[in-house]
Each structure stands twice: as structure tokens, then as C-alpha cells.
Image: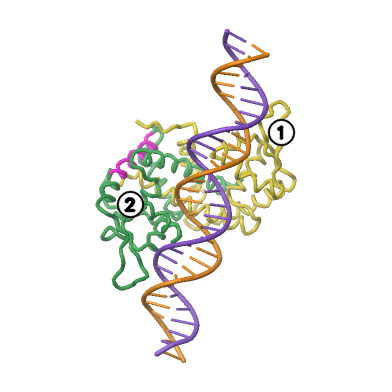
Chain colours: A yellow, B green, C purple, D orange
Amino acid sequence: MSDALDVSLRLVKAQTALVRRFDSRLGALFGVSLADFLVLLHLGRAEGGRMRRVDLAGALGLTASGVTRGLAPLERIGLVVREADARDARVAYAALTDAGRERLADALKAAEQVAADVFAAPEWAGADVEQLSGLLTRLGGTGLPEDHGTGA
Amino acid sequence: MSDALDVSLRLVKAQTALVRRFDSRLGALFGVSLADFLVLLHLGRAEGGRMRRVDLAGALGLTASGVTRGLAPLERIGLVVREADARDARVAYAALTDAGRERLADALKAAEQVAADVFAAPEWAGADVEQLSGLLTRLGGTGLPEDHGTGA
DNA sequence: TCAGTATTCTTGAGCACTCAAGGAGGTAGC
DNA sequence: GCTACCTCCTTGAGTGCTCAAGAATACTGA
């Protein structure tokens, strides 16, 4: 097996373990999944604490459908509200509520802690983390929605 | 946000894109998902081309339940068969059929190609890939089948 | 020997996503 | 101001996993 394939499969597996770790901690403490947390994080960083659902989908790497379904429980528990656009009745914004902002702040602390734990082991030097970050950034755009994988 | 959290989230996103790319290519060409391919790959590398389902779960990073469900379609299309253990009636092996072995060989070629495409861009030197591999291995990316010297 | 416990696997219910289809609203050309 | 098309979002059906519960089998120690 080539190094390229080997590293691809390793990455897939490492992510599974990582997601479980985040889900477990965030779920236990704050009742949100990693996916929920990422929604809150993106909204929290957006202008006015809100985003069009289609833009959120792009930012999260999901389909619009996935956003609709993922947002529903967050709206139900009051972390996010739906807002209309005055000029274009097609678009619906997802906006952080005050409760959502609080939950985000708490979850962010917990997520930082999990990440710190993951990279805390003696074999992880700060330089390693930066190196990994750089390498992953190059992979970041790979195969996003606009890429139709025409291959060949 | 800390580097550790940043890199964790980057990894999660990179994986999503990577999985889509593999799924799309493998699905179009051979009618198997990346998850299916990984099952075949692990079985192909195992002693006798077969594994206990519980061991397969461990190797894949899934639950036993996930293996039962994932194996069902592969058994239905004849790539894998169920085999009993003579000494322990609890265990059921998943074993590669000849058709499964062929499909694995084909899918492996396609997967190599996808991985080569991903890491083909000019910014990826061989040393970078090895570095990334090393870093990911520390993250718990173990469980890949061992491979010796087939080179590339 | 046999009661209690552990292991392996399957199943039912549920969750989070996908794709395909469709409704509703906006836009451009004539 | 109509027609055709495009965009944004939701919904129905399906997939692939999870957890919890349970059946069958094996192991252990009094």
C-alpha cells in the first residue's frame, strides 16, 4: 500500500476517535454533539451571530438538507432561532440566541480542554501541533461540494 | 481558539472531504463504499482471509452492531461469507470469497489512485506525506493492516 | 455441578446524514 | 406581465451508524 493511501486511511480512523472524544465530553456536560457545537461556533463568529442556512451548510461541509435537520433540535431547545430576511422571502437565517451564546461559551471551554488533553501527551510538542495544522490545512479544500470528482 | 482545538476541527473537516472523495470513486466504479472497502481490506490482510466479527469491529473502530449491519450487504452480494468456529459456537467469522478478493484488488487500485490524486498537487512532497503519517499515527490511527515493502 | 458472570453476536429503536423531488420566491428576456 | 429558469429551503425515503436489550454460548469457582 502506498504512503498516500496509508495516510488517508489513518486520517479517517483518527477522526473517528477524535469525534467520539468530543461528542462524549460535550454531550455529557452540555447536551450538545460536536456537530451542534460546530453550528454554534460558526454562528458565533458570523456577523450579527447569524447566517443564511445555505452558507452555514457550506461552512460545515453539509448539504442544505443536513442543516435543516441539524438545526431543528437546536431551535427546539432555544439555542438558535429562525429569522426571516426582509428583502428575500426565500432565505431563512439561523441566529444565535442569548442562551445559545452562553452554551457556546461553555462548550468552547470544554472543547478546548478535550483538544488540550488529546495533544497533551509527552510526545506532542507545540511544533508538532503546528506542523500537523499546516499539513491539514493543505488538505482542507479537498473534495468540497463544488468539486464533482470528475477524476481522470 | 487554541492550536490544539483548531487542528482538531481541521482534521474533522478534512476527513469529511476525504471520505466523500473515496466513496464517490469507489461507489461509481465498484459499487462499494469506503467502509465496505475497509472491511474487504482488513479481511484480505488477515490470516486465512477471515476475521471474527468482534475483531473486525475493533480493527474498523466500529461497534459489533455496526459490523453486523455493514457485513449484511457484502454477504448478500457474495463478497463475504459467514463461517462458524468449530470450537466456539458464539463466534462467527467473516471470510472473503473469491469474488470478494477480486473486488478488493480492483477497489485497492482505485483507492490508490484517489489517494495519489489527493497528494499529487505540487505542494505535497513525499516527506510531507510521511510526516503527516507519523503525526496521525500518534493520534491513535493504529489498526490499519500492516504492510511490508510493496513500495509504491 | 451448576450458578453466576463474561463474551459474541443480533435486533429494535433512534439519530444524523444523504439524495431526489418539490414548493415558494426571485430574476431576466421578450 | 408572462414564461422560463434559478435559488433557498424543506420533506420523504433510504443508509449507516449508535446504544440498549437480549439470546446463545463459554468460563469460573464454590
Quadrant in which the C terminus of chain B is drawn: top left
Across and down, in percent, residue B117 comes to 37, 36
Across and down, in percent, residue B135 comes to 44, 49
Q: Main secondary structure of the magenta part?
A: helix
The stretch drawn in magenta includes residue A118: no
Provide the secondary structure element on which disc 2 rests.
Answer: helix
- Mark count: 2
**Is B104 or B98 nearer to us in this picture?**
B98
Q: Looking at numbered disc 2 in the image, what kind of residue is underneath it?
A: Leu
- The residue that mark 2 highlights is B41
| Placement of B47 over or under D6, stated as above or below | below
- The residue that mark 1 highlights is A84
Pointer 2 indicates a residue of which chain?
B
Across and down, in percent, residue A19 comes to 52, 52
Q: Looking at numbered disc 1 in the image, what kind of residue is underneath it?
A: Ala
**Residue range highlighted in magenta:** B106-120
Q: Is residue A25 left or right of residue A146?
A: right
**Is B91 or A59 nearer to us in this picture?**
B91
**Is B38 or D3 nearer to us in this picture?**
D3
Quadrant in which the N terminus of chain B is drawn: top right
What residue is drawn where x is 60% and y is 52%?
Answer: A33
Residues flagged by tags 1 and 2 on a common chain: no
Provide the secondary structure element on which disc 1 rests.
Answer: strand
Q: Residues within 10 Å of mark 2 (few under 14, many from 20)?
A: many
Asked if disc 1 and disc 2 are in contact, CB closer than 8 Å, the reply is: no
